[in-house]
Amino acid sequence: MEFHLNCELPELKLDLDFRNPVCLLGSCFSDEMDQHFIQCGFHVLSNPFGTVYHPIALSKLIDRSVEENKEIDMVINDDLYFSWDSASVIHGYSRPELEDRVHKARREFKDCLANGSLLVLTLGTAWAYHLKKDDSIVANCHKQPSALFDKKLSEVEYMLETLNSSIHKIRQLNPKLSILLTISPVRHFRDGLVENNQSKARLIELAHQLVKLDGVEYFPSYEIVIDELRDYRYYAKDLVHPNHLAIEYVWNKLKPSVLSPETIERIGQVAKIKAQFKHRPIHMESRSNQERLKKLQQTREELDKRFPGINWK
């Protein structure tokens, strides 16, 4: 007897290379996944502009990074300078300081796209905040008065056209980069449950239109949490964010979907060695512990020879 539904998973089998970084961009769910990629030995750049939820805001970040655009739409709040295109973690105490941070993030992101093997793009919401002065969509409101914004539910066609253009620019920069789309299972409860479902439905349709493009795939993290787990014990106390158990569950579903069995075995070895290096026994200077560390170092060097570029940090 089956006690829960099983979500059909894609077999993408991306043979990721340790020498090529993994880029993650989007909602806070991206930040949850990046720690797993790091633990498995990959070089990762996750949300260099902070967490950003809306597809149009993500598209703008991609475009301005790829094009090396120097333009920054700034907003000043007390003694802090923010960018409408980035989350509040990207800030400065002067205009030049903010410019330096944003331009550095754009350079790092473009470099990751140009040399990376995988871009995971996590879409969070279709609800957009438009600045009334020019109707532009902001990535973050930076606690500015609500009177400055119009809140609108973006049309699928508009988001599709914009992201389609951005993906084309990525393809010109790096034709070999694989793009994996996913929908964040985080509920945007402040929008309202009905409104959240409206939003997620549009994002799902958007993603399934985009996978018609070459090199773009979809991973059902949203469906796994909502339909397979579908229990509040897999959520944090706020009943909105998936908890540690849910994140682990999704990660264990992701691995066999995007990686070959050989790669899974490889990253398993890396994760095990990294965990053993982090272990701190009571008697650090003992002979047995020194011998243990020596053997671990030898094993690590052997893996480095077979698979160059492993991130041991």
Image (spheres, rainbow, N blue to C red):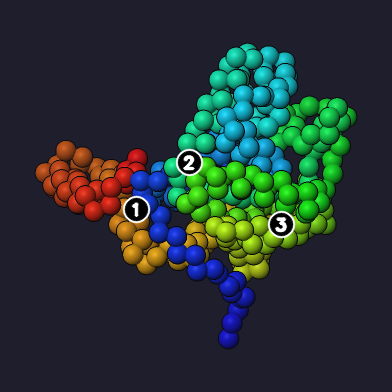
Instruction: Tell me the residue at 74%/34% (across/down).
Output: 138
Q: Are marks 3 and 1 in contact (CB under 8 Å)?
A: no
Which of the two labelled residues, at mark 2 and mark 3, occupies the earlier sequence position?
2
Instruction: Tell me the residue at 55%/53% (across/down).
Output: 179
In the picture, the quarter occupied by the N terminus is bottom right
Q: Could one spot residue 52 in this view of the protein?
A: no
Residue 88's place in the image compared with 99, above or below, is below
For badge 3, the amino acid type reads Leu
Q: From the top left corner, tell me how far across and down residue 56 is, in percent.
A: 71, 43
Marks 3 and 1, how far apart in space? 35 Å
Q: From the top left corner, tell me how far across and down residue 79 is, in percent.
A: 68, 14
Along the line of sight, the residue nearer the viewer: 76 or 176: 176
Instruction: Tell me the residue at 32%/59% (across/down).
Output: 266
Disc number lying in front (3 or 1): 3
Marks 1 and 2, how far apart in space? 26 Å
Q: From the top left corner, tell me how far across and down residue 52 is, in percent.
A: 65, 40
For badge 2, the amino acid type reads Ala
Q: Which residue is mark 3?
A: 206
Residue 91's place in the image compared with 1, above or below, is above
Instruction: Tell me the residue at 66%/42% (across/down).
Output: 59
SS label for mark 2: helix
SS label for mark 3: helix
Which of the two labelled residues, at mark 3 and mark 1, occupies the earlier sequence position?
3
User: Which circle marks residue 271 in the picture?
Assistant: 1
Marks 2 and 3, how far apart in space? 25 Å
User: Which circle marks residue 307 in the picture?
Assistant: none
Q: Which residue is mark 2?
A: 114
For badge 1, the amino acid type reads Ala
Which of the two labelled residues, at mark 1 and mark 2, occupies the earlier sequence position?
2
Residue 299's place in the image compared with 313, above or below, is below
